[in-house]
Amino acid sequence: MDAPPFAPTLTTDRLILRGMTIADWEPYATMWQDPRVTTYIGGVPRTRDVSWPKFGQAVAMWTLIGYGNWAVIERDGSMFLGVAGLSDFKRGIPELDCCPEAGWAFAAESWGRGIATEAVAAVVGWADAAGLAETGCMIDHANIASARVAERCGYVRFAELPGQQRTYRRTR
């Protein structure tokens, strides 16, 4: 199945970022069942029944607000690596209510290769080109790897939140 037409396709040296399709469901669900992936994102592996509405939410953001998550795929099309993009979760957190929220999650098998930095850089490049003046993100204080990704992509620490979370902001 082709990617939805409302999510633009981005390419980098090693990656394709495209709208998620039903073909991404199985690797997406498998990724979120891995406790390594959820260590700093909720702390609990996601069951399929929890992942399914989140999968739909990621796809629906594009039609509702004009941005959303991309499936991140190896450039040769061989492997689903994870997701990255922008969202508006209506969390009620003032530090994030100002702007689209960047987020990313990758299958553990893709860690340590610079994939997250490459994908997030593509996302923020798209956000800049789309005229989004500011984006934010929320990262668990112990997630050093994601904090480094954010900083490499121009995010700066903005605020400490209860529950061991930090927010970051990026302006163009």
Image (tube, rainbow, N blue to C red):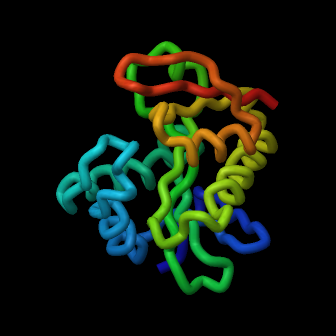
Is 144 left, or right, of 43 in this rendering? right
Looking at the image, residue 68 lies above or below residue 119: above
Tally the marks.
0
The image quadrant that residue 15 belongs to is bottom right
Residue 42 point in image, percent of width and height: 31, 41
Q: Which residue in the rendered view is the most extreme toward the top?
A: 94
Looking at the image, residue 11 lies above or below residue 95: below
Residue 127 point in image, percent of width and height: 72, 42
Q: What residue is drawn where x is 49% and y is 61%?
A: 106
Q: What residue is drawn where x is 71% and y is 59%?
A: 118
Looking at the image, residue 103 lies above or below residue 49: above
Q: What residue is drawn where x is 52% and y is 80%?
A: 79
Pick the residue in front: 160 or 76: 160
The image quadrant that residue 128 belongs to is top right
Pick the residue in front: 46 or 97: 46
Residue 156 point in image, percent of width and height: 70, 27
The image quadrant that residue 34 belongs to is bottom left
Residue 56 point in image, percent of width and height: 35, 54
Is 19 left, or right, of 45 in this rendering? right
Quarter of the image with the C terminus is top right
Q: What residue is drawn where x is 51% and y is 25%?
A: 166
